[in-house]
Amino acid sequence: MLQLQPVPKVITFDCYGTLVRWHDAVRSAARAILAGRLTEPEAQKQSVALADRLRSAAVERQQRPPYCDYKSVLRSALAVALAEAGHAAEPDDEEMLLSTLRRIEPHPDVPAALHRLRARYRLAVISNTDDDLIAGSIAAIGVPIDFVVTAEQAQAYKPDHRLFLHAYATLGVTKEETVHVGMGQFTDLKVCHELGIRSVWIDRVGEPLNPDWPPHAKLDDLTGLPDMLSVS
């Protein structure tokens, strides 16, 4: 069970994957991009691999200096993923990707859990994104979020410690006054382990856990989080 001493003041969340259906959105964009090049069955078949490579290429680009905005990261990652699949990226492809990712629907368990948590805690998002790109997804959740802290604001991407430290300065809290909830192991559990931040891992897809970054607690989704944090 997660230790709640000291009592947290803010619960921080990763957004993409943790709160909203990021993987589904990227796959949807990949299918639409491939639909102009392949038959429907082939586009469906290849979309998962394209989406997976796009995500990994984006993470790779985030880790290379200098910092660049997330929309540029996505454009670069899409070009890499398409080229490796034998296609050249077109302006329409980039627009399709960005338009799909501007508003991502929440996982079904998220609104009710956040609503319960708001009765006791302030809520914050710490995300590897741009302010304008995430705004629609935050709105789609339908529950007020007190703070949205992005890589654009900190000029750094998780797992760079600077994004979390910038978030705590913005929130006016110490790391001891927070609990972080995230799906990403490399982006979230790694930095929580390194900085000593209490963490809850949301394992939505049944991933093997990297033993180097153990979370303090694990859930399959957000349904049990309010009870874990003793919210009535």
Image: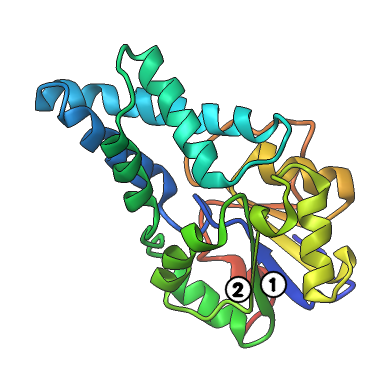
Q: Amino acid at mark 1?
A: Leu
Mark 2 lies on residue: 226
Task: Assess disc 1: are there few (<14), some (14-19) or many (≥20) residues with their C-alpha within 10 Å of its C-alpha.
Answer: some
Q: Quadrant of residue 88?
A: top left
Which quadrant is the N terminus positioned in? Answer: bottom right
Give the residue displayed 74% in from the left and 74% down from the top. Answer: 10
Q: Which residue is mark 1?
A: 229
Task: Give the CA distance from mark 1 to mark 2.
Answer: 5 Å
Evaluate if marks 1 and 2 touch, with contact meaning CB atoms under 8 Å apart: yes
Occupied quadrant, residue 198: bottom right
Relative image position of residue 77 (x, y in whole percent):
48, 29
Can the viewer see residue 24? no
Up-down relation of residue 70 to residue 117 (above or below): above
Given the current orientation, which residue lies at the most extreme front position? 91
The colour scheme is: rainbow
Q: Is residue 226 left or right of residue 141?
A: right
Q: In the rendered view, would you say 43 is above or below 171?
A: above
In the picture provided, is 190 more to the left or to the right than 220? right
The amino acid sitting under disc 2 is Pro
Between 141 and 120, the residue placed more toward the observer is 141
Residue 133, image x and y in percent? Answer: 47, 57
Total of numbered circles in the picture?
2
Mark drawn on residue 190: none
Q: Position of residue 34 (x, y in %)?
A: 22, 28
- Residue appearing at x 49%, y 30% in the figure: 76
**Where residue 79 appears, x then y in whole percent?**
42, 25
SS for dot 1: loop
Residue at screen point 88% across, 71% down: 5
